[in-house]
Amino acid sequence: MGVKYSPMKNKLAPENLIDRDISDLRRRSARTLRVTVPAMEKILYRRFPVLDHGFVRVVDYMGADESVVQSARVSYGRGTKKTSDDRGLIRYLMRHWHTTPFEMCEVKLHVKLPIFVARQWVRHRMSSINELSARYSVLDREFYLPDEKVIGVQDLKNRQGRGSILSRERAQSIISILRDDAARCYDHYEGFMKGEGDGQSEPLARELARINLPVGLYTQWYWKTDLHNLLNFLRLRMAVHAQYEIREYARIIGGIVAKWVPLSWEAFQDYRFESATLSRHELNVARSLASGKRPRKADLSALSGRELRELADKLGVGSKRLR
């Protein structure tokens, strides 16, 4: 990758300063007595591209599947338990919502992402974040432009989602407008900092110059969280109803977690991500169907029309069987 320079005083742009530090870290090695995961050591500091300019990379991690097990058992003699025992315990913990043992593992990620994705991301508050400061640094001229294959109209049922994909011609037109708007805003941003934005010679403070930058601009941060809260993040953001852009980040992070804690990841998929939760009345209906009986009217009437449709989807039965 070529070196980028910021428009101010020919300084290295923030991303390249970080890359230089990462390169220094990759050249170092040290022996340790702590738990390590060979698969994670292989990908440590490696970039995983996301969207057009974004990426995710592991900066640091603590713990592994055996750390979850060790915490659950409190006192754990290494080598005295079989892997199958560890798998069974982890699955039991996940199945019965014992969350604390999973909090014993932590990971720190370096993420480059569009600002609008970052605003969604920070709704998950159980983490530590340190974001690139636009008061101090000059932001790179990089904006997210969606691929024409993911540009859709407003969904008629889902108020926060997109529906059918636009024609290629209209999608390209929208991308062109987004690109022009982003470039124009960045030109003004750059001009303000050079003292050229309003015809004056004094540069505007960076904390003010950034005001008109669009949410499609890329930012960066370090994000540190424990495994329990990371899995909850992935459960929500890998779901089909999550916005495509953040779902792409979640997909990449999910692949990292699968390498880091494969037993916990397997249990997560079985008991969280690919599972379904039933309410009291839904469970009663399911029990009736399993025993070949008609569901009780009291249970059916307690469920709204939407709940009944969702229950039919969960059970894989026709909605008529619930009437």
Image (cartoon, grey):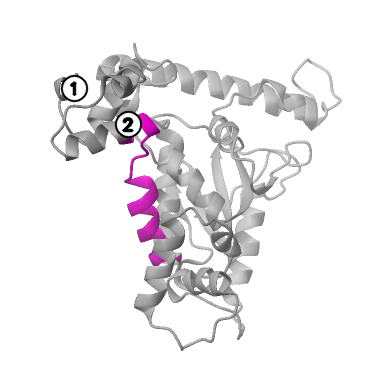
Question: How dense is the environment of label 2, judged by Cα within 10 Å: few (below 14), some, or many (20 and up)?
Answer: many
Task: Quickly name the residue at label 1.
Answer: 319
Give left or right: position of 28 versus 269: right
Q: What stretch is highlighted in magenta?
A: 261-283
Magenta segment includes 263: yes
Q: Is residue 179 above or below residue 29?
A: above
Hey, what amino acid is under mark 2? Glu
Q: With respect to residue 224, does 112 lie above or below?
A: above
Residue 256 coordinates in the image, percent (x, y): 43, 59
Mark sitting on residue 12: none
Whether residue 171 is visible to the viewer of this picture, yes or no, is no
Total marks shown come to 2
Q: Where does the C terminus fall, quadrant-wise?
A: top left
Please name the amino acid that badge 1 sits on: Ser
Q: Position of residue 290 (x, y in %)?
A: 18, 40
Looking at the image, which residue is at 55% across and 78% down? 35
Q: Residue furthest right?
A: 202
Q: Main secondary structure of the magenta part?
A: helix
Which of the two labelled residues, at mark 2 and mark 1, occupies the earlier sequence position?
2
Is residue 68 shown in magenta?
no
Residue 91, compared with residue 137, is above or below; it is: below
Badge 2 marks a residue whose secondary structure is: helix
Taking depth in this image into account, of 189 and 116 the one nearest to the observer is 116
Residue 282 numbered mark, or none: 2
Label 2–label 1 contact, CB within 8 A: no
Question: Which type of secondary structure does the marked residue at label 1 adopt?
Answer: helix
Return the residue nearer the eye: 270 or 119: 270
Q: Residue at x 64, y 51 (%)?
A: 222
- Residue 239 in percent (x, y) is at 38, 38
